[in-house]
Structure formats: C-alpha cells, structure tokens
Amino acid sequence: MDEVAADTRHILGVLNWITAARKPRNRDDWRKLLVEARARQGVVAPSEWKSKTVM
C-alpha cells in the first residue's frame, strides 16, 4: 500500500508541476510535458504506470 501511495503522490506531483509551470492546450502539449517531467524527475514511463494494478 505504501508503494501505491508513493506512486500516487509522485504522479500528482508531476501533474501539479505540469499544470502550474505550463498550460497544456492539447494532447501533444501534454505528451511533451510528460516526457520533460519524466526526464527531470526520473519518472517511470506512463506505460509502466498503466501496468501496475491498484487495489
């Protein structure tokens, strides 16, 4: 459960950074900003996020 909570906090932190720092207008903007955030913080790839099951 702690791992899920940590992942959730991390993902929310990334989304907070994206929406506060930039104003994404479309899917391409979101994709670029997710790649940038991942590079800045060593985030796992979104495909890996989806593969985790949350209970």
Image: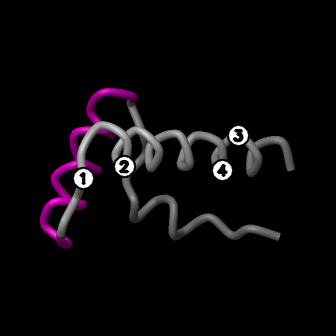
Task: Assess whether residue 42 is covered by the magenta stretch.
Answer: no
Give the residue at mark 1.
23
- Rendered view: 30 above or below 18: below
Give the residue at mark 3.
6
On-image quarter of the C terminus: bottom right
Q: In the rendered structure, are the residues bearing label 2 and label 3 in contact, judged by CB atoms less than 8 Å apart?
A: no
Q: Is residue 54 left or right of residue 8?
A: right
Q: CA distance from mark 1 to mark 2?
A: 6 Å
Q: CA distance from mark 4 to mark 3?
A: 5 Å
Give amino acid for label 2: Thr
- The span shown in magenta is 26-41
Q: CA distance from mark 2 to mark 3?
A: 20 Å
Q: Is residue 19 left or right of residue 1?
A: left
Q: In the rendered structure, are the residues bearing label 1 and label 2 in contact, judged by CB atoms less than 8 Å apart?
A: yes
**Mark 4 nearby-residue class (10 Å; few <14, some 14–19, many ≥20):** few
Give the residue at mark 4.
8
